[in-house]
């Protein structure tokens, strides 16, 4: 028996256009009739028992449940696999044009692709990628299987539509076969429908999974409720049989503890009767810490356990009076000890570390008395100690150097005037001694900080072990703590406060000369010590003391640097630091920078990982007033350095006589040093005269740069040395290199523009009384400009290594200046050529082709060229002279050709042409003698005429 199954999509059958409407309507009943299914019912057989669900209960509980889970999982897996395979396969069977998000039939491009046949050779976009991979034969077979017999109606409609459309309206294309197009679109429609059915089936499966999980959750919740009922029943049993008995045991224990507390309070009352006598005895023995401990213990007992005892109502106030009296005594002792410790000048390393003595118990007592004013005392004493140390060191140095000072009288005048009489080495040695002593003092303050912090930690640990006080005094302290804001962890973290400086006796400079400190007033207002401000704020708790203690070192460093600023200002009262040579200023700056670095190291050591205050967190950078003062002096130095050299260059250039100057050895040394090191530098001291005053050896006639000799004016040599000094200044102050570069370019441009005004603009005729601007003057100007232009690239490379990365664009000024120098040189050369051209044209205008050769005209031409050669070659090297003569020769040939054309000279006139040839040969012989060998290319007069 063979079973054949025929399947076809029901929607395709019902919507088949080849079937008539009657066939579609009677599709389900045409073979079987309207009453195909019988309605008769059959009775239940008596031999078959009635089966209910109870017969399968045990099966459903055990095996059937697992089996259902298995079938459900297998079915879900099969559906997922089928859905995946079917979806991937069916999607590939759809053409890509239908997947385009821009697909729209009103778009002609998509309309033509669907309804019109493609051009021969084009890809049919209505064919899917799977069908495109098959062979053309397989495509035809698949389409024939899908297609049905075309009806006459469809063919007629297609042909009629094709006939109604003109051929050119379809661009040579024809409509697709209607039946094939309809079947293909129906096929694609079925694929999309199957994909949608698969997705809907997957969503339904998830819904039933959710329903089943909800039912299981309800079953588990019912079991949990039963368990809770059992637990509550057990808790009621425990409460009745166990908890009630244990509660009674705890009540008995509480009664026992209350009786013990009463006994302890009675003992405390017995002890407090002798509290005052004990404190007086300890004070008589100068044992302040134990006396304070006794008072605090008594106050603690009064405030906690014996608060309502009537017989002790006045004892608390009496103990407070004793407490305040002890605090005042400790404050006085602290002031005396600090003044004694800070009164001596520190000169040895052994004096730095503080040896624990009387200061340790006094600080501990002050902290326990809550007398925190000792920090303000330390603030004042640090300032006075810095002043005293500087005063004593300066006095001792002045007395030591007194024999070498003129009109020295330490009893008269002030220390500032006496210090200004010191020589530079003596002043530097005095400054070194001051720095050494101040560093030792700062380290001494650091050791006292450690002592204070040690006592603060002891107090904190002691208070942490004591119970919280509730007395009136403690409540008052607590209220004060709430009213005081949180203090910064360090002085550098605090905002700089505009606190007015206290009037203090001045030693350098003195108060009787207020103008001497005017220079620091603005500086001081900008850098008021925030450490001093924090130390002057009253502390209300040990925690605030802990936060302020790190400010002691910063305050000491700030005070020391502030007094050093006054020392520098006293020395620079007459402009010493602002006008001294950069070499001298650099030594002073290095000395000051070393002191600032040592101070910064102390601060970093304090806040470092292993430092005393390494756990306070981030610490802001300390703002050094001394560094700001040195920065101000360096700015003034650079400004004065530039202004003095600019004025010097302008005055020397205006007074220049425009004659070749002798070259002292110092300038040749600068050039030789540049050739050896590749950097322009002045080996001599920068404060010496820059006009060549150091004449120890006979001056040379020219400046030798490599293998080239330069014969220049004295101003060019002066500018060369100035540029070297600017380069040295940039190396000495690399942070100010952009400003120095700007000043250097300004000086170089000033020389270039002023030279142009004096020579090309004839300004030298009025300034120094020159009768005329000669060829030699022009050559000297050009040669001087060439000398400076030769060193500009060297200076550019030098500054490229100095300037920071974000300032490298400043190097463009060198390129601009070099271009201006080259343009200026070209202008001078053009001026020289125009001067020679004037004389040549004047001589050629009187040229007569007659007589003997050489003619007078050509003799005059050679004479003028000879004068030009004598003036130009006395300054310029042979190469430059030849270059200029070739330029003159080119211009001469042009002028000669014009004159000969005007005279009508041509090769046909043999007599005149021969005379001109002889004159031109005479000219070439003389020009060849003036130039370098082989530089001039001899030409015939006929070649000149053809140009």
Image (cartoon, grey):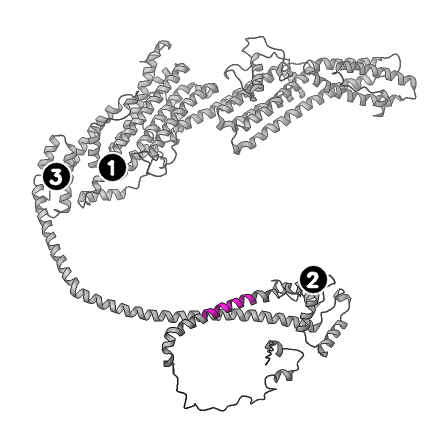
Residue identified by numbered label 3: 318
Distance of label 2 from label 3 (alpha carbons)? 113 Å
Q: Give the quarter of the figure containing the C terminus.
A: top right
Name the quadrant containing residue 769: top right
Between 733 and 198, the one lying in front of the other is 198
Q: Is residue 565 visible?
A: yes
Circle 2 packing at 10 Å, graded few (<14), some (14-19), many (20+), is few
Circle 1 packing at 10 Å, graded few (<14), some (14-19), many (20+), is some
Between 902 and 340, the one lying in front of the other is 340
Residue identified by numbered label 1: 457
Secondary structure, magenta segment, majority class: helix
Q: Position of residue 182 (x, y in %)?
A: 67, 73
Q: Earlier in the sequence, mark 2 or mark 3?
A: 2
Q: Earlier in the sequence, mark 1 or mark 2?
A: 2
- As helix, strand or loop, the secondary structure at mark 1 comes to helix
- The region drawn magenta spans 72-85
Distance of label 3 from label 1 (alpha carbons)? 29 Å
Name the residue at the front extreme: 1
Residue drawn at the location 48% of the way across and 28% of the way down: 735
Question: Where is 81 relative to 617, above or below?
Answer: below
Residue 433 is inside the magenta segment: no
Label annotation for residue 123? 2
Residue 76 is inside the magenta segment: yes
Viewer-nearest of discs 2 and 3: 2
């Amino acid at each position: 028996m063979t079973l054949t199954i025929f399947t076809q999509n029901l929607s395709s059958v019902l919507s088949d256009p080849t079937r008539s409407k009657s066939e579609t309507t009677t599709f389900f009943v045409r073979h079987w009739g309207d009453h195909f299914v019988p309605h008769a019912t059959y009775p239940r057989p008596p031999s078959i028992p009635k089966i209910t669900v109870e017969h399968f209960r045990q099966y459903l509980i055990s095996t059937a449940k697992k089996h259902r889970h298995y079938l459900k999982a297998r079915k879900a897996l099969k559906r997922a696999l089928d859905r995946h395979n079917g979806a991937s396969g069916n999607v590939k069977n759809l053409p890509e044009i239908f997947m385009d998000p821009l697909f729209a039939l009103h778009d002609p491009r998509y309309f033509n692709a669907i309804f019109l046949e493609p051009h021969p050779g084009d890809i049919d976009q209505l064919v899917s990628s799977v069908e495109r991979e098959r062979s053309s034969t397989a495509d035809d077979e698949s389409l024939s299987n899908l297609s049905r017999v075309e009806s006459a109606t469809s063919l007629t409609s297609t042909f009629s539509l094709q006939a109604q459309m003109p051929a050119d309206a379809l661009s040579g294309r024809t409509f697709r076969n209607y039946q094939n197009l309809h079947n293909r679109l129906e096929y694609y429609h079925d694929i999309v429908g199957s994909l949608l059915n698969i997705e809907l089936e997957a969503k339904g499966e998830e819904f039933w999974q959710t329903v089943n999980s909800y039912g299981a959750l309800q079953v588990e919740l019912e079991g949990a409720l039963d368990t809770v009922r059992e637990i509550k029943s057990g808790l009621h049993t425990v409460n009745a049989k166990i908890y009630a008995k244990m509660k009674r045991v705890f009540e008995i224990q509480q009664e026992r503890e209350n009786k013990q507390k009463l006994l302890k309070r009675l003992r405390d009352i017995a002890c407090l009767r002798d509290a005052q006598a004990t404190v007086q005895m300890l004070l008589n023995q100068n044992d302040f810490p134990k006396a304070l401990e006794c008072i605090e213990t008594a106050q603690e007992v009064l405030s906690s356990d014996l608060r309502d005892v009537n017989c002790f109502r006045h004892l608390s106030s009496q103990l407070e009076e004793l407490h305040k009296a002890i605090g005042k005594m400790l404050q006085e002792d602290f002031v005396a000890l600090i003044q004694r410790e800070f009164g001596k000048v520190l000169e040895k390393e052994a004096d730095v570390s503080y040896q624990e003595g009387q200061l340790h118990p006094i600080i501990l007592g002050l902290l326990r008395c809550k007398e925190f004013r000792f920090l303000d005392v330390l603030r004042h004493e640090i300032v006075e100690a810095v002043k005293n140390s500087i005063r004593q060191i300066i006095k001792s140095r002045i007395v030591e150097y007194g024999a070498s000072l003129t009109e020295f009288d330490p009893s008269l005048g002030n220390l500032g005037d006496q210090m200004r009489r010191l020589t530079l080495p003596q002043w530097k040695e005095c400054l070194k001694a001051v720095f050494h002593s101040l560093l030792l003092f700062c380290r001494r303050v650091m050791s006292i900080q450690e002592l204070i912090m040690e006592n603060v930690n002891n107090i904190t640990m002691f208070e942490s072990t004591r119970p919280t006080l509730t007395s009136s005094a403690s409540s008052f302290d607590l209220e004060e703590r709430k009213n005081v804001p949180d203090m910064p962890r360090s002085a550098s973290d605090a905002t700089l406060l505009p606190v007015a400086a206290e009037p203090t006796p001045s030693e350098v400079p003195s108060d009787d000369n207020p103008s001497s400190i005017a220079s620091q007033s603005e500086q001081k207002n900008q850098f008021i010590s925030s450490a001093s401000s924090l130390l002057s704020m009253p502390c209300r708790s040990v925690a605030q003391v802990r936060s302020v203690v790190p400010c002691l070192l910063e305050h000491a460093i700030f005070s020391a640097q502030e007094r050093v600023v006054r020392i520098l200002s006293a020395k620079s009262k007459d402009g010493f630091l602002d006008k001294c040579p950069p070499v001298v200023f650099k030594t002073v700056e290095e000395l000051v920078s070393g002191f600032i670095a040592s101070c910064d190291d102390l601060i970093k050591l304090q806040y470092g990982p292993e430092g005393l205050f390494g756990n306070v967190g981030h610490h802001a950078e300390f703002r050094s007033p001394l560094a700001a003062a040195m920065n101000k002096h360096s700015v003034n130095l650079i400004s004065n350095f530039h202004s003095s050299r600019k004025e010097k260059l302008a005055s020397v250039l205006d007074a220049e006589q425009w004659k070749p100057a002798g070259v002292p050895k110092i300038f040749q040394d600068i050039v030789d040093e540049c050739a050896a090191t590749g950097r322009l530098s002045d080996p001599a001291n920068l404060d010496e005269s820059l006009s060549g005053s150091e004449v120890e050896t006979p001056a040379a006639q020219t400046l030798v740069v490599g293998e080239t000799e330069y014969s220049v004016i004295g101003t060019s040599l002066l500018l060369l040395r100035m540029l070297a000094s600017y380069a040295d200044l940039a190396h000495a102050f690399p942070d100010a290199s952009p400003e120095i570069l700007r000043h250097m370019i300004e000086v170089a441009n000033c020389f270039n523009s002023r030279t142009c005004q004096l020579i090309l603009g004839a300004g030298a005729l009025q300034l120094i009384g020159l009768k005329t601007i000669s060829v030699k003057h022009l050559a000297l100007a050009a040669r001087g400009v060439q000398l400076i232009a030769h060193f500009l690239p060297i200076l550019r490379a030098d500054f490229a290594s100095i300037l920071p990365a974000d300032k490298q664009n400043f190097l463009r000024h060198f390129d601009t200046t070099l271009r201006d120098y080259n343009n200026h040189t070209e202008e001078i050369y053009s001026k020289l050529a125009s001067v020679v051209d004037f004389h040549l044209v004047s001589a050629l205008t009187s040229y007569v082709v007659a007589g003997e050769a050489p003619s007078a005209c050509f003799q005059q031409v050679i004479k003028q060229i000879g004068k030009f050669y004598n003036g130009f070659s006395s300054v310029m090297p042979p190469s430059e002279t030849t270059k200029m003569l070739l330029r003159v020769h080119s211009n001469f040939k042009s002028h000669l050709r014009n004159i000969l054309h005007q005279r009508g000279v041509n090769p046909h006139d043999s007599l005149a042409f021969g005379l001109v040839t002889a004159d031109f040969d005479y000219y070439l012989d003389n020009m060849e003698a003036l130039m370098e060998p082989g530089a001039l290319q001899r030409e015939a007069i006929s070649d000149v005429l053809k140009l």
